[in-house]
Image: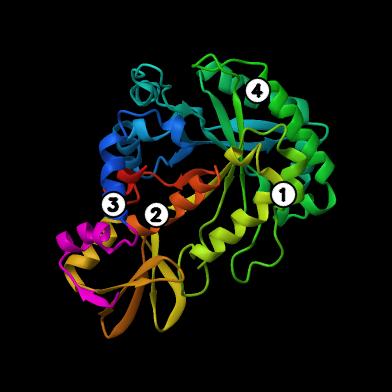
Amino acid sequence: MGIIRLKVTALISIYLFFAQGGLQVAAKQQCEECHNECQANRGHVLGYVTPWNGRGYDVAKAERGRLTHVSPVWYQLKASSGSPVLLGSHDVDKGWIADVRGQANQGCQTPKIVPRFVMEMHPQQLLEVLTDAKPEAIRLLARECSGQGFDGLVLEAWSLWHAYGIVQRHFMLIKSFVRDLAKALHTQRGHSDNPLELILAVPPVVPAQGHGSPGFTRAHFEQLVKFVDGFSLMTYDWNIGASGPNAPYNWVEANLKTLLPACLGHSCHKIWLGVNFYGRDFTSQTQEADVVLGHDYTRIVEQYQPHLHWHEEYREHVASYKKDGRQHQMYYPSVEAIQARLTLAREHSFGISIWELGQGLDDFMKIF
């Protein structure tokens, strides 16, 4: 497709014209219909929102018709004097929750509010939560969801369990914890009068480059799928520590194909491929990179007018430019890149999880 020099306004809009196979027409039609069709009919789309990025709160409200789940990153499950404690309730914004839910269209549901609860503990404390302190930890989580009127929760603990060797040595304890937490949630009703949901944030089953053996596997999925309502699969950050794409298409596809035999025909809708709305900017002198958000991207494009190139194998755009005598390569999502992953997911009945709302360009949500 070659290399093109573009001004910022043209650069952002040109993505719709770079696509192959009629993407421009398909994306336009989808945008026109998105508020008239129930998002649930097109598969799960979860969007994360963080307190340190206020724009995400606005995007969640504006684009609520394209989302089935919204996960504000509010809570931490920690330990104090041998007992689990829950922090983060001060971040809960009831007015914003009401705005996101809004008024449902006829026959449609409003987005489910499923805050993220992250475990932040030392190895011994993690083991205690999976054993002696398990009833109290589950009680805290279920009570908070019920008391705040949430629709469930996203539990982020798996990466920590894996880092400390707990997945490898004590998987049956994890399975017991997940099963009992799911049971406690499923016996309660949320805002929409449906059982509260349990979503697990899990690492990719095919690890990124240089990340060793997988922390989450197809066997783990098969053991847990009967209890869990969704798996938020972190198929991004392939380029941590080395210049390259954020989430090369063939790697994302390999993750999907690894799980497909375990879910085909019954539970693929529970797997939500991760899609990044951020990028990374590498220099030729180092493999470290700066994280790039939407406002960073537009500033760089305006100031340096980079060369934009579509990498067919990765199905990502890379922008090349020079700053202070150093050559930069910036990998940042585009409409075409996101559309390719969205199409892949929907062709196999997988869902999508977005990290994070508010980090992308305005065009990004229009294709969901």
Q: Identify the element where label 2 is drawn.
A: helix
Residue 279 at x, y percent in the picture:
39, 61
The span from disc 4 to disc 2 (Cα, nearest Å) is 33 Å
Tell me, for residue 361, which label it has, or none. Answer: 3
SS of the residue under disc 1: helix
Tell me whether the residue at label 4 lies in contact with that at label 2, contact meaning CB atoms closer than 8 angstroms.
Answer: no
The residue labelled by disc 4 is 185
Which tag, 1 or 4, sits closer to the chain's start? 1
Give the crowd class for mark 1: few <14, some 14-19, many >=20 residues within 10 Å: many
Q: Amino acid at mark 4?
A: Leu
Q: Residue 28: x and y, percent?
A: 25, 46
Q: CA distance from mark 1 to mark 3?
A: 34 Å
Label 3: element kind = loop
Q: Amino acid at mark 3?
A: Leu
Residue 319 vertical placement versus 148 (above, below): below
Please state the horizontal and vertical placement of residue 251, each as a whole percent of the image: 56, 64
- Which of the two discs, 1 and 3, labels the residue nearer the N terminus? 1
The image quadrant that residue 97 belongs to is top left
Q: Residue at x 33, y 45 (%)?
A: 367
In the image, is residue 234 part of the stretch drawn in magenta? Answer: no
**Numbered badge on residue 161:** 1
Q: Residues within 10 Å of mark 2 (few under 14, many from 20)?
A: many
* First in sequence: mark 2 vs mark 3: 2
Could you tell which of marks 1 and 2 lies nearer the N-terminus? 1
Q: CA distance from mark 2 to mark 3?
A: 12 Å
Of 271 and 189, the residue lying toward us: 271
How far separated are the C-alphas under marks 3 and 4?
35 Å
| Marks 1 and 2, how far apart at CA | 30 Å
For the record, the magenta segment spans: 1-21
Question: Disc number at residue 338?
Answer: 2
Q: Name the residue located 69 percent from the left edge and 28 percent from the top edge.
A: 182
